[in-house]
Amino acid sequence: MSEWKEYKLGELTIDGKGSYGIAAPAVDYDSNKYTYLRITDINDDGTLNKNGLKSVDDKNAHKYLLQQNDIVFARTGASVGRSYFYDERDGELVYAGFLIKYSIDPTKVNPKILKFYTHSQAYYDWIQTVDNGATRGNINAQTYASMPIILPERQEQDRIVSILSSLDDKIDLLHRENATLEQMAETMFRQWFVEESKEEWEEVPLGNVVKTTSGGTPSRKHSEYYENGTINWVKSKELNGSFISATEELITKEAVAKSSAKMLPEKSVLIAMYGATVGEYGILSKPMTCNQAVCALIPNENYPYTYLYVWTALMKEDFINLASGAAQQNISQDLIKQQIVCSDLDKIKQYDEMVRGYFEKMENNQKQIITLTETRDGLLGRLMSGEIKV
């Protein structure tokens, strides 16, 4: 590690300081306005969460546009420390007031090394030591600027960035391919079931033709139900519009049996019913269970998962608008069951036959994304700690 040197974040920037984002309200997304980057739009892995993006409509918004080599940090709340390194492929982004921006100087450091450093264990450890919010996390611009960063010499930085970026690019390509495939399925759905809908089609409440169920919270009285678990337990925050093959927690069949939780079959479509994630959705790659904040739609022969998934995706805004509650937005399972679906079973079957290949490709891509992500994260820790020299 003799070739490695400690810097302060401020020393690696153009102006030596951070800049707070614009204090402006978010408005409904509009492609003619700037996209608004908020803390909630940043995933834990530092990528842009494209579900539920908003715009900003303010005369000063252009002053807060992110530029090449900019990185932003969340300064408050439960997500304090979350970071996003600007990717021009994400389009023009205006950063919000709860984010702090630093413009990295490419003559002092490979800027992208900061993207990876802020997902290393050293960074997470530092966040824990400086987070000074008693009940709500808080790290200001001055503190971030003083963050110690230990880095190798420039050539090794470049090699590290090249290795990790190549994996990032492969992951991004797969995500974009999945987005395209889903958009194709949605476009066909709109054409067949909305634009070309027939007057003779009967309006059928979802609950009349599809079984729905909500989850439960297994008892924690016996810790082995979690420590030695084999069944994935899905939480509403894990619904991100894609196939779900793994979760944060595993439980046992005994834990499920002792609670209101239920086993859900493969390809069940899940909808978040409570809180900040209300309306978010996902689909199971294998049998799992879920918590009480999730509604599951169980596919059947007449209503396959392909139809239910795209219907759910297109209903997201409706579910958000239906949600109520002053302290916490929520939508009931009964309200979801009342929503209308198509009654033309032959048309649904034809649709399933047309798009099934899209979904199989999407699921395979998602499996590759998980493998590549695990590979990248494993390498990241070893590269950024100096365990592996390149």
Image (cartoon, rainbow, N blue to C red):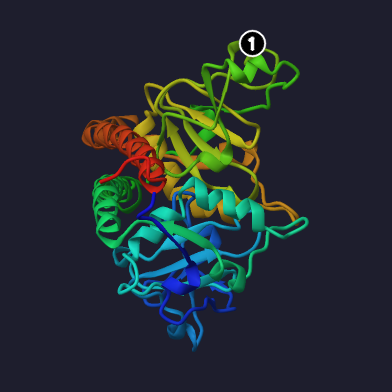
**Amino acid residing under circle 1:** Glu
The x and y percentages for residue 160 are 29, 51
Residue at the spot 58% in from the left edge and 74% down from the top edge: 97
Direction bottom: furthest residue: 59
Left or right of 152? Residue 238 is right
Q: Position of residue 316 (x, y in %)?
A: 49, 50
In front of the other: 51 or 204: 51
The quadrant holding residue 379 is top left
Nearest the eye: 47 or 14: 14
Question: Which residue is depicted at the point 48% across and 79% down?
Answer: 16
The kind of secondary structure element at disc 1 is helix
Q: Is residue 57 left or right of residue 369?
A: right
Question: Which residue lies at the image location 72% right of the left edge and 58% below the top edge?
Answer: 136
Q: Quadrant of residue 364?
A: top left
Task: Name the residue nearer the viewer: 137 or 237.
Answer: 137
The answer to whether one can see residue 287 in this image is: yes
Q: Residue at x 62, y 36 (%)?
A: 333
* Direction front: furthest residue: 2
Q: Is residue 48 visible?
A: no
Query: How many C-alpha atoms fall within 10 Å of the one at disc 1: few (<14), some, or many (≥20)?
Result: few
Residue 357 screen position, x and y as percent? 22, 33
Q: Please indicate whether residue 211 sits to the left or right of residue 260 in the image.
A: left
Up-down relation of residue 357 to residue 89 (above or below): above
Q: Is residue 341 above or below residue 26?
A: above
Residue located beneath label 1 in the image: 254
Picture coordinates of residue 84 (x, y %)?
44, 61
